[in-house]
Amino acid sequence: MKKVKKLLLAVLTLVLAFSLSACGFPGMGDDSKKDEDDAGKIEASVKKVTVDAGSEEIIEIENYDDLKKLKFEVEDEDIAEVEETDDGEYTVTGISEGKTSVTFSAKDCDDLTIKITVNAGEEPEPVEIEVSVTDIIVTEGDSAYFTVNNYDEFDSLELDCDESVAEIYDIGDGEYEVVGAGEGETEIVISAEGSEDVVISVTCEAPEYEIVVNDEGYVEFGTYEQDGDDSEAEPIEWIILDENADGYLLLSRYVLDVQPMDSRTSGDVTWEDCEMREWLNADFYDIAFSDDEKDLIVNVTLENPDNDQYGISGGEETDDYVFLLSYDEVLDYFDMDVYSSSDYYGGAESLITEATYCALESDVYAEELTEDLYYDYGLDSYYSEDCIGTTGVLWWLRTPTESPNGYPSFCFIHTDGEVGYDLYGEVGCTDIGVRPAIFISK
């Protein structure tokens, strides 16, 4: 009977032990709780990170392959940034001095928070911007160049200047083109983050004017409407009458316009006070010449000789940009084919002048020198046959003369190249052409 009781007690002890083990009580030979604790952790190579601003440190998640849906969040990205740079490898970049943290989370795991401390670190030494020049002189419309010698040391460069004076173009590898835009001075300011600005002084100069001589040997200077097409004025062609060390005396090749000398019908009228002078130095001057061309036109002092035949005063000296030739200047600058000093009369084939289409349309007096007229006028004794067929026009001189009617009058050149004090045009005549003269500097 005792043996039976002992046997029953042993059986009950085994049953109770088995039951307790099945219910998961600790200490009964069950290791499942320990295994669950180990699987629920995110394991990192560091517990905290200290990094300088601008520097980097690495965090490695050591059990990365065992984790599901691993992600992270940075508390303050103004202090530090974190980026996954490889499987299980995260790069911490210091942004600014301060403290923050990064928290990793994964499915069925406790979050892992790693504290990050960012130190100010040492300020980097500023990089000096090195340029090839400090001063640039460029002509309007032309180019000059400079180089930022160490451009590859900068993430970016900013350049600024007054674009009305100069324009800047980046042509690559740190080289820049400067194009003159307008006369003046400016500065190119070159900036880069962390570096002191560098300044290049720029002077843009107006281009030097070059005398343009066309294929026919005439100077082209200024523009004036000549062909009746108002869309664009044509270049004015000029004959070089004289040249000296200072410049050129020019006379227009054609009669360009038709204007009366003055509106008065009585009294003395001289070049000094006539309306033609005012028109030439104001209206014509402003229409025909650009500002750059005006800079080359000399304000010359003119003597205004008397009319020797009739004893008429030529008036006081004048200062003019644009003027008409005097009777005496015609004799000085043109070779007379025939001339009588006692009669104050002569002529030259070279004085026969044609007019522009616009001047002809304005009713300048014109006459074609036909072969019959050539012989009737006796020009065959003085002129070549080359002038036959030429349509000459009348053009004013600035020398006053006498009119039989007593009206104030000025000399003119006739259609056939004749010149004389007896060739008069009353100041109000509207069929005598204008052939301007100017003096331009070299």
Image (cartoon, helix red, strand yellow):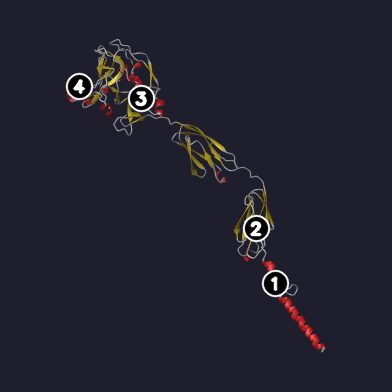
Tell me, yes or no, whether the two marked residues, 2 and 3, touch with CB atoms within 8 Å.
Answer: no
Q: Which label's residue is closer to the chain start, 1 or 2?
A: 1
- Separation (CA) of disc 2 from disc 3: 84 Å
Q: Which label's residue is closer to the chain start, 3 or 4?
A: 3
- Separation (CA) of disc 4 from disc 2: 115 Å
Mark 4 or 1: the one toward you: 1
The front one of 248 and 318 is: 318
Image coordinates for residue 263, horizontal then vertical, percent: 30, 18
Element marked by disc 4: helix
Image coordinates for residue 190, horizontal then vertical, percent: 55, 39
Q: Quadrant of the N terminus?
A: bottom right
Give the residue number, with chain letter if any, for mark 1.
32
- Separation (CA) of disc 4 from disc 1: 138 Å
Q: Is residue 241 visible?
A: no
Q: Which label's residue is closer to the chain start, 2 or 3?
A: 2
Query: What's under tag 4, amino acid-wise?
Result: Asp
Q: Which label's residue is closer to the chain start, 4 or 2?
A: 2
Q: Which label's residue is closer to the chain start, 1 or 3?
A: 1
Element marked by disc 1: helix
Q: Residues within 10 Å of mark 3 (few under 14, many from 20)?
A: few
Give the residue number, with chain letter if any, for mark 4.
380
Q: Residues within 10 Å of mark 2 (few under 14, many from 20)?
A: some
Mark 4 or 2: the one toward you: 2
Say the numbered circle drawn on residue 283.
3
Residue, x 62% and y 42% (percent of image)? Answer: 126
Query: What's under tag 3, amino acid-wise?
Result: Asp
- Separation (CA) of disc 1 from disc 3: 110 Å
Tell me, yes or no, whether the two marked residues, 1 and 3, touch with CB atoms within 8 Å.
Answer: no
Q: Quadrant of the C terminus?
A: top left
Q: Which label's residue is closer to the chain start, 4 or 1?
A: 1
Give the residue number, with chain letter if any, for mark 2.
103
